[in-house]
Structures are given as C-alpha cells and as structure tokens.
Image (spheres, coloured by chain):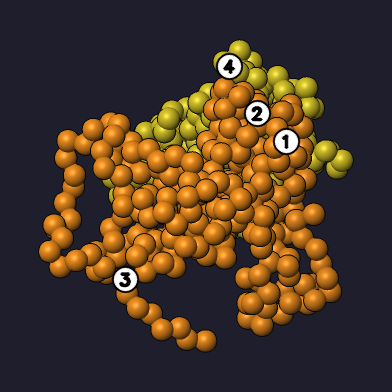
Chain colours: A orange, B yellow
Amino acid sequence: MSTSFTPVVAGSALPADAPAAATPKSISHRGGSPNPTAAALQARFPNSVRSVTVVWGETTVIVDRGQLLETVRWLHDDPSQRYDFLADVTAVEFRDLEQPIEVVWHLRSLPYRRFLRLKVLLEKGTPLEVASVWSVYKSADWLERECYDMFGIRFTGHPDLRRLLMWEQYKEGYPLRKDFPLRGRFSRSEQLRQALAANPEARYSKEELTIAQAFEDLPDDMRRRLSAGEKTGE
Amino acid sequence: MGLSRRPDAALAQLSSGGDPWVTTRLDFVVNWARANSLWPMPFGTACCAIEFMATAASRFDLARFGMERQSFSPRQADVLICAGRVPFKLAPVLRRIWQQMPQPKWCISMGSCASSGNGIFDNYAVVQGIDTIIPVDVYVPGCPPRPEGLLYGIMLLQKKVMNERAADKSLRNEMEPDPRSQLYIPPPVIDEISEPFGNSVHQTRSGL
C-alpha cells in the first residue's frame, strides 16, 4: 500500500501580503483579538458555541457536547480552516464539586498558522461521555486512551478504548480525578500483589490491531500461540 | 596470611568445629574470583542510569573493578543494578529478570527511588523500594548518587562477597515468593516499610 504524501507548508494558505511569522510580544492576559476561526464557528454553529475567550492570546471556544464531532470535522475539512493537526486531548477537573469537568482539544492549523483550544463541559452527575474524534484525527487514538485512563472519560466511537498508562487490569480507578487519593486506594501490599500478578510476557493479543496486521511477520511460536486463541494480559 | 599457618593450627580449628583450612582457602579463592569479576546487569529506568553510564565510562571506569563486561542479558549476569524508580507496571518485569539470573547473584539498589521510593514518588504508581520485589544486597543513597557513590556501593558488595562461605547454603537460597500472593515479604511488613518516611523510621528493610 502506498499513499501519496503532500508536505504541509506552514502558512501556505495565508495571503501573500500576510506579515511574516514572528514570536508575538506584549500579549495581554485577558482580551485581545480572538482567532478568526471563533467567529466562523459562531456563524456556522450558532447553537453549539457557548463562549469564546482569549487568554494570553490563545482562543478558547466552549462548544456543545453533542455537536463536538461535527464541529471538529468541519474545522478539519473546511478549506477556510484546515485544522490538520490535533496536538492534545486532555481533561481538567476542578476542586469545586459544582464545576464541570472540562475536556480539552488542542487544534492547530498549519496552513493558516492558527491555534484553537476547544472545550466541552461535562457536568457532574452526568455520564462522562463525549464523542471520539478518532474518525477525524487518527492521532486521537492514544490521546483519548490516556484521557480515559486518567480521568475515566468515555470517548464514544473510539475503536479500542483501553487503559494506556496503567495496566489494563488496574482496578483502583482513575488517578487524575480529584477524589483519587495520591497513594491509590489499596494498601501497598495489595497494590504490589496485583502488579506482580501480571504476566510480563503476556502483553499481546490478536485483538490488537497492530499485531493482527503484523501476524504474518511474527515468529513461528508466537503465531502458534496466538492461533490457538491464547488470551493475554488476563 | 593464613597460607603460612602451621598444619596443627588448622587441625585445632577443625577439632573446634570451625571450617577446615582447605575450605576456607577455597572460599577465599572462589570469593576473590567472584568479587573481581562481577558482571553487572544494568536495569536503568531513570536519571540514575545516566550516572551509571558515567560510572561505566572512561573517567570512573567500572572496568577497574572487574565489571568490564556489562551484561545486558540476565542469564549471564551476576549483579542486578537497579538504577531508577520502578513503577508498579514494571514490577513483574523486574521480578522476572531477577528470577532469570543464575545463582550466585547479588543486587544493588542504586538511588533513593529504587531503595525507598524517594518520598517525592510516594504515589499510586511507584513501588516503594525494590526490596519489596526482590532481595537487595547494597543500597546506594543519592538522587542520583554520584559515580563515586556507586563505586563505593560496588566495593561494599565486593567486601560482602569476600566474606561469603561455600558451606553457608542459605546464601544461595533462591527466595521463593508465596505462590498465592507472589510476595516474599509478609503484606503487613510491606505496608509498614512503604508508609511515608518508612525507610527513615524502619532501618530494617533488607534484614526484614
């Protein structure tokens, strides 16, 4: 399989008379001109955009939970936006019990040299679910897995939502949540017992997409074991 | 030197229940050979591994102590040098590597993280001292220890090796973990030495 590769030149979509890229100076903390994408979003999704704020020159747009995927797809596909790089997916939980958990997407448009921070508010008491943007950005795969691992936010539509940093049988919860004790929920001996119960050689299963693709290239013994239906990591 | 000792002295020692002269001399030769050809297996997980590399490099030159060959396979290693913190996810790997090493084997816990979790890593993800997973012979304090510190630890280990006796079979006992829990220290003891400042309060980690 060969795919054609077109290099993306930063700033290539900007008009020819646009000022040269330079590190901005003397940015105010609050205020300043928002990213032009924010106005475009408000025009395109008037019911979805809840607020637009500019902090340290970076634009944050809070969008509606239900229309997130639609919004992101439009930002990626529309020729006037071309957000072709998903830099990060993460979440923020506040100590305030009333304040909702924020899920944050960092989007970057290389051709337009733009940065946009998208947020979705997940109210406490509602299921922590939001649409996965994996269908738009493949890089969302591990970012969303990490976010799920640390915060317990379920990304619906993700093809393989498992823990990423902690091992898959980790039972203590989601470590970056505010109600998670720093040393974990179990005693040290119980933590150690559960960690040592894992088989270090059993990490792969045929369900893992990459292994399934590489199956023909695997050594004979591993192919035999996987063909016999050996489940791993259990 | 004991080599010049007269035979009747050896006989006297034999009759008094001590090790016979031949055995002690054999122990000396074997220990001398072992202590000066320790092959380290570096298990570097963090910044301590950088200091280990510095120790192995030309300025400090680990080869002076018979550690010319770094063994990157546990099958040919004598000393496991755990350099850096060990997260719980890595605990079964470290245990497996230790079990793969043939006897006789020793372990150096390099740095505060490997020895005790270092306090700053007293969190949900990090093992509070690798001696809860595998037996440790020498602890090297420091964050990370300077190469001189590691060399001192290695020389202490050599001293320990020189004092071993072949007749003492307990030295070569492979510590079998409890088959059900996979722990070889009783859980209450693990909880005790893992609590905050556990390593400062309980100075009995390796002695159990």
Give a yes or no on whether discs 4 and 1 share a subunit. no
- Observer-side mark, 4 or 2, equals 2
Residue lying at 74% horizontally and 29% vertically, measured from the top left: A186
Question: Alpha carbon of mark 4 to alpha carbon of mark 2: how far?
Answer: 21 Å
Number of the front mark, 2 or 3: 3
* Cα–Cα span, label 4 and label 1: 23 Å
Comes first in the chain, label 2 or label 1:
1
Q: Which amino acid does label 4 sit on?
A: Phe
Identify the secondary structure beneath mark 3.
loop
Q: Say whether disc 2 or disc 3 marks the residue closer to the N-terminus.
A: 3
Evaluate whether label 2 is on the same chain as label 3: yes
The disc numbered 4 marks a residue on which chain? Answer: B
Q: Rounded to the nearest whole Å, what is the CA distance between mark 2 and mark 1?
A: 9 Å
> What amino acid type should be assigned to the residue bearing mark 3?
Val
* Foreground label between 3 and 4: 3
Q: Name the residue under label 2.
A: A180
Residue under numbered circle 4: B197
Q: Is residue B143 shown left or right of residue B193?
A: left
Inter-mark Cα distance, 3 to 4: 53 Å
Displayed quadrant of residue B139: top right
Q: Quadrant of residue A126?
A: top right
Q: Which residue does the image show at 77% across and 72% down from the upper left?
A: A226
